[in-house]
Image (cartoon, rainbow, N blue to C red):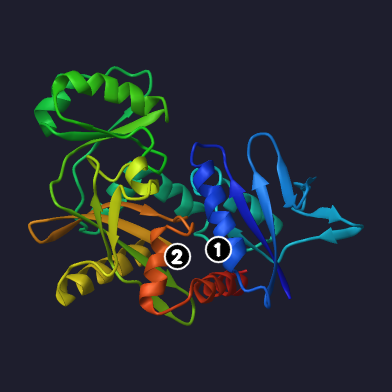
Amino acid sequence: MKTIAIVCGGYSREEVISLRSAEQIAQVIDKQKYETFTILINKEKWVAKIPGKDIPVAKDDFSFIMNGRKVSFDAVFMAIHGTPGEDGRLQAYFEMIGIPVTTCNVFVSALTFNKFATKLFVKEYGILTADALMFHKGKSIDIRVIAKRFGFPMFVKPNNGGSSFGVTKVKEMAQLEPAIEKAFAEDTEIIIEPFIEGGEYTCGVFKSDTETLLLPVTEIVSKTEFFDFEAKYTKGMSEEITPARLSPEKTKECQELSSKIYDMLGCNGVVRIDYLKKEDQFYFMEINTVPGMSAESIIPQQARAYGLTVTEFYTKLIEDALTRG
């Protein structure tokens, strides 16, 4: 039986989502195949969450002692959204000590966590994506130039981050400076891009040495201004329709585009790619290399719609990691 670490927590406000993902993974993972331990990593501690107590995890080899037994791991099921589990930092650590992870490698994780860099990368391959500008904290920003270039509405968002923290849909000039301040409160880099009016869609892709799963597309209908944190994680604030209300032809187009992006970036494990569809064309928005795995998350929905149980799907992720390791 393989021993798997479900790693959760993180350094950002996405920790609460990470804990939900870890709880779901621990509940449905195949107990006949894997012994699992939930490992919490945050700025204060690295601990194994054992009922009734926390046991410190040694950072030199990622192990801990429980009842006289040294527990080491065959693979890591990554459930940290944001830094350090989605930006390549922990991937580098686990690569150095020889433990395979269910996510992309160091370089791809670091690249895709940077929204602006990813947009530039996919643009070189002819992928449609919204125009964007990036700004660094402490540097002057001429909001008149931005307004003239993009018009209103526009989006202001942290360049590195997720769950829509710090994102604002700006409808008029008076909202632009406060939106910039809000985004800089989350990150030292921000991006500003024009609003693209259209439907929101997202597609999951998983590939291993032996199979390719192009998951059903999900259509997102938000009851808020956009698919923000409230819409993502508050019941009833959005409708996630899987499979999406697309023609078979457009569904295939979205899946094949997602497969192309997965390959051009060199992804591993499962990723989720977000789009806006305007005038029958899909515009790449961003890629999630550690997508949510909580009970209400989109990837588990897509796996079920594909015809897999979530347990079966998680087994595929783990076995792929073990094979790559």
Q: Which mark sits nearer the N-terminus, 2 or 1?
A: 1
Instruction: Farthest residue to the front: give it.
Output: 236
Pick the residue in front: 249 or 18.
18
Q: Is residue 19 above or below residue 138?
A: below
- Residue at point 50% right, 49% down? 86
Label ID, residue 263: none
**Dot 1 amino acid type:** Thr
Question: Which quarter of the rendered picture does the C terminus lie within?
Answer: bottom right
Pick the residue in front: 206 or 294.
294
Can you give x and y, in whole percent of width and height, for residue 55 in the image?
A: 79, 47
Q: Label 2, label 1: how many angstroms apart (C-alpha)?
A: 8 Å
* Residue indicated by mark 2: 270
Can you give x and y, in whole percent of width and height, for residue 279 in the image?
A: 7, 57
**Dot 2 amino acid type:** Val
- Residue at point 49% right, 73% down? 313
- Residue at point 19% right, 42% down? 131
Q: Is residue 3 above or below residue 276?
A: below
Q: In the figure, is residue 284 to the left or right of 182?
A: left
Q: Secondary structure at mark 2?
A: strand
Can you give x and y, in whole percent of width and height, for residue 197 in the image?
A: 13, 47
Label ID, residue 102: 1
Q: Quadrant of residue 142?
A: top left
Q: Quadrant of residue 162?
A: top left
Q: In the figure, is residue 227 to the left or right of 38?
A: left
